[in-house]
Structure formats: C-alpha cells, structure tokens
Image (cartoon, helix red, strand yellow):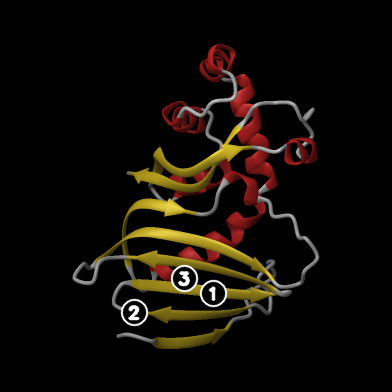
Amino acid sequence: MKNLIVILNLFLGLNSLLNAQVTISKTNVDYSLKLEKDSIVRILTFYKVADSSFYHAIHYAISDFSHTGTEFILKNEIEFIQQLWNMAEDSISLELRSANIGYPLEYSDVLANHIQAFLDSEQWQKHITQNGKKLDYEIIKTVMLKQDVYKPFHDFLKSKGYHISGFSTEKHGFVTKENLQKAGFAGNEIIPMPFMVWIILSK
C-alpha cells in the first residue's frame, strides 16, 4: 500500500540504539526503515519489482546533520544494519541479489582495506608499472572481490546466508593525496576509486 507510514518509538534494550526512533515506510516497490539518533539518520531500504513477492536489492545510507565531520566506520555500522534488517525480516521476504551501502571513501576502515588491497595486488602493481596512472575496470573489480575490501559487511552477510560474489562499479577516479595521508599512507600511492559501487550477492 503506497505511502503507508508506521512510526515506531523503540527502546531497544541496552545497546546503542537506545531511545532511537525508527520510521518504517512502504510502497509497492520498496520497504524502508529510517533510524534517527544523535542528529544522524540511517536508512536501510529493500527494493523489489511491483509484482514480486520477494525483495531483491538493498541500499544503506547515512546522513550526518550534526555538521561535526563524523567519521563513519563500517564495522560500527553493522549493528545498525543488523537491527534494521532483523526488523524488516519480520515483515518481508528476501531473495537478495545486490546491495549498495556506499563507496570505500565513505568508511574509514573500508578505505584503508581498499588502499592496502591495491598495494598488495601484484596484478594492479604490474598494471601501473606498464601503464602508469590508468584505470582498468576489470582489475578494480577483481581486486576488490579478492581482497574482500567490504569485509565487515561480508561477514554480516554470511550470517544471513549470503556472500559477495562480485562488484559493479561506475564513475571511477583515484584516491587523492589528502585521503591517502588521512588513511595513514604516504600520499603518493596510485589507488583507483569507484564512486558508485553495487555489491553482487549470492547464496
């Protein structure tokens, strides 16, 4: 039923979601859970086609309205994803095929994993030795999968019966010197960066 809005004021035990407000909205193609806490809004949305009984894709987004430059860590976000996912499972059926939870620059731990993955990749290092600072989309997706750059999310997915089987990426560039140094690296590393990432899921 389109535009059905149910507001739940939840007191969720002694965990970090204490006193958080969760808003659930549903249309014929999506089921969305919005959690508001400490000026930060987190939204987990499940998508399906209109005539399907199963939801096939998810999207997780964070908005920080405190303007304090909060640094997000994917490992810490898993508890929020898990709580919202568990709530959704009581109401909808899942047959997931893809997920979008943001690109590596959005999480400090994923960014560090991503940078180290390309530094450790013989395939990527050989590529830049031969071609210089040039993008290779297939290598990017291969390295991200092989080195498990989204490991905290992947570990959670396994608990739900899914695993990451590939990536689809768009709008590529390179990690800037500033972001490299912020992540604890020298700043002269050549690291590709997709700015749109879809995670392909399999059971």
Q: Residues within 10 Å of mark 2 (few under 14, many from 20)?
A: some
Residue 7 % position (x, y): 51, 87
Residue at 38 percent of width and 44 percent of height: 200
Taking the image as shown, residue 68 lies to the left or right of residue 39, namely: right
Amino acid carrying mark 3 in the image: Met
Residue at 49 percent of width and 66 percent of height: 44
Q: Is residue 81 above or below residue 124?
A: below
Amino acid carrying mark 1 in the image: Lys
Label 2 or label 3, whichever lies nearer to me, is 2
**Distance between mark 3 and mark 1 Cα atoms:** 11 Å
Q: Which residue is mark 1?
A: 34
Q: Please give the label number shown on residue 46.
A: none
Taking the image as shown, residue 83 lies to the left or right of residue 166, namely: right
The residue lying toward the viewer, choosing from 172 and 108, is 172
Name the image quarter holding residue 141. Answer: top left
Q: Which residue is mark 3?
A: 87
Q: Which residue is mark 2?
A: 27
Residue 160 % position (x, y): 42, 51
Q: Is residue 106 above or below residue 191?
A: below
Taking the image as shown, residue 161 lies to the left or right of residue 84, namely: left
Q: Earlier in the sequence, mark 2 or mark 1?
A: 2
Q: Residues within 10 Å of mark 3 (few under 14, many from 20)?
A: few
Name the image quarter holding residue 69. Answer: bottom right
Residue 11 % position (x, y): 63, 80
Amino acid carrying mark 2 in the image: Thr
Q: Residues within 10 Å of mark 1 (few under 14, many from 20)?
A: many
Q: Is residue 132 above or below residue 166?
A: above
Residue at 59 percent of width and 74 percent of height: 35
